[in-house]
Image (tube, helix red, strand yellow):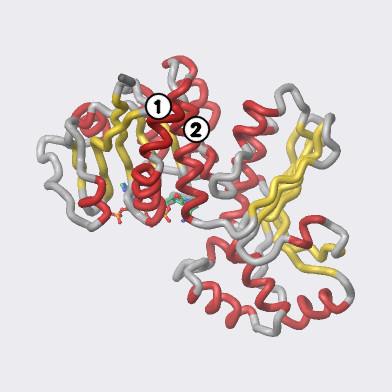
């Protein structure tokens, strides 16, 4: 009989809930194909407080919105990890754009308390990747974050596991779905405002879409990929950033009529020992593979010494794919 792994979730919003649902859907596969048994022993959010039960929480009840009372003795994340006897902590709280907190502290606490740490939140990767990676190594634990960029598409694990020893010289990608969908709507005749409203109606853009439109989300993803895959030490404020707010529908449609497409392109390149990165709208010829990426799809094209162009594309991303990235990380962490 495989040992049962105790899992604890920080954040129980769209991603956290979809992940719990996916875990239950894949329970049989995890047991039969990977020898992994698990129980959910902790869940915590700002509003819910620190909920822990080392004997297991009822996933179905949590998904119905029925939560046990939080532990009144539990004052912080370390108390909660101990009470849940958590062996794997999943970080799915909201991104703090300025310093990545408290998610960075959550991951640090998980690793220091002897748990593997898996994050969908970009904050810990952008603001503390080297420190958390080294801490995980020192403790013999895993810090994994496949869902942080392009949902669950295997970007980080491809370079960690599948294409060892390649030199990554740079990349270009379309990594933000909201702006891509907005630009597509503008091509079809909408103004920027109408296109944003449509993206909000479809549940793709947030109520306050500025994080996406101003290029911040794309910037964070660019930093995460640069620092993890290219060994950079970039900070978000070092990325040249331009959003799509200044583009007009007419500009976008004129480009389309002349065989071009406007895309918000994320780019990083090694230049004289440093990594130079940018996020900006570009008028791409339709012969560029990034020009074919439409709607809520995304893609990244890596230039390496072995593959001049290695393109990973996700057609129609979504929450299941994000939850899958957490699941794949969980399997990886459980095998090592
Ligand atoms: N949605 C996606 O498609 C997607 C894809 C890839 C990555 N991500 C990343 O995954 C994370 C979660 O996204 P989401 O869509 O699930 O967001 P969400 O629906 O807004 O849920 C966020 C959850 O985090 C909790 N939370 C926020 N701040 C917290 C804090 N300081 N301490 C404890 N709990 C806190 C919230 O609890 P309260 O409501 O109680 O505050 C809520 O349960 C984000 O970092 C996001 O960038 C999302």
User: Residue 75 bears which disc, if any?
Assistant: none
Left or right placement of residue 271 versus residue 329 in this view: right
Q: Which residue is at a point 44% across and 16% down the rendered structure image?
A: 140
Left or right placement of residue 47 versus residue 160 in this view: left
Left or right placement of residue 308 versus residue 132 in this view: right
Q: Residues within 10 Å of mark 1 (few under 14, many from 20)?
A: many
Q: Which residue is mark 1?
A: 116
Query: In which quadrant is the N terminus drawn?
Result: top left
Q: Which residue is mark 2?
A: 144
Question: In the rendered structure, which disc, 2 or 1, sits on the residue that comes first in sequence?
Answer: 1
Left or right placement of residue 298 versus residue 68 in this view: right
Give the camera-side residue of 141 and 273: 141
x, y percentage for residue 323?
45, 47
SS state under label 2:
strand
Residue 226 seen from this side:
yes
SS state under label 1:
strand
Q: Which residue is at a point 27% across and 54% down the rendered structure image?
A: 63
Q: Is residue 87 above or below residue 312?
A: above
- Contact between marks 2 and 1 (CB within 8 A): the answer is yes
Give the camera-side residue of 211 and 52: 52
x, y percentage for residue 76?
23, 36
Cα separation between marks 2 and 1: 8 Å
Residue 240 seen from this side:
no
Q: Is residue 154 above or below residue 3?
A: below
x, y percentage for residue 173?
71, 51
> In the rendered image, which quarter is residue 74 located in?
top left
Q: Is residue 206 above or below residue 79?
A: below
Q: Which residue is at a point 78% across and 41% down the rendered structure image?
A: 310
Q: Which residue is at a point 22% across and 57% down the rendered structure image?
A: 65
x, y percentage for residue 294?
69, 65
Give the camera-side residue of 149 and 236: 149
Q: How many marks?
A: 2
């Amino acid at each position: 009989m495989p040992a049962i792994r105790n899992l604890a979730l920080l954040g129980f919003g769209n991603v956290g809930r979809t992940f719990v649902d996916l875990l239950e859907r894949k329970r049989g596969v995890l047991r039969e194909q990977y020898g992994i048994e698990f129980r959910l022993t902790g869940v915590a959010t700002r509003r819910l407080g620190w909920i822990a039960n080392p004997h297991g929480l009822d996933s179905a009840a949590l998904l119905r919105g029925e939560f046990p009372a939080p532990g009144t003795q539990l004052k912080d994340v370390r108390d909660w990890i101990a009470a849940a006897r958590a062996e794997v902590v999943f970080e799915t709280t909201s991104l703090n754009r300025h310093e990545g907190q408290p998610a960075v502290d959550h991951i640090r606490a998980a690793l220091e308390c002897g748990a593997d740490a898996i994050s969908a939140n970009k904050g810990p990767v952008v603001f503390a990747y080297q420190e958390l990676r080294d801490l995980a190594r020192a403790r013999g634990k895993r810090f994994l974050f496949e869902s942080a960029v392009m949902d669950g598409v295997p970007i980080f694990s491809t370079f960690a596991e599948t294409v060892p020893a390649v030199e990554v010289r740079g990349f270009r990608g379309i990594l933000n779905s909201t702006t891509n969908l907005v630009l597509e709507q503008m091509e079809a005749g909408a103004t920027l405002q109408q296109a944003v409203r449509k993206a909000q109606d479809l549940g793709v853009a947030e109520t306050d879409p500025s994080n996406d439109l101003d290029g911040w989300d794309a910037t964070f993803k660019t930093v995460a990929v640069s620092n993890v895959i290219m060994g950079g030490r970039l900070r978000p404020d070092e990325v040249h950033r331009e959003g799509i707010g200044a583009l007009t529908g007419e500009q976008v449609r004129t480009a389309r009529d002349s065989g071009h497409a406007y895309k918000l392109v994320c780019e990083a390149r090694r230049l004289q020992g440093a990594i130079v990165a940018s996020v900006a709208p570009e008028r791409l010829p339709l012969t560029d593979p990034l020009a074919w990426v439409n709607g809520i799809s995304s893609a990244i094209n890596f230039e390496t010494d072995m593959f001049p162009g290695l393109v990973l594309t996700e057609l129609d991303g979504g929450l299941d794919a994000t939850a899958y990235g957490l699941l794949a990380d969980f399997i990886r962490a459980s095998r090592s």
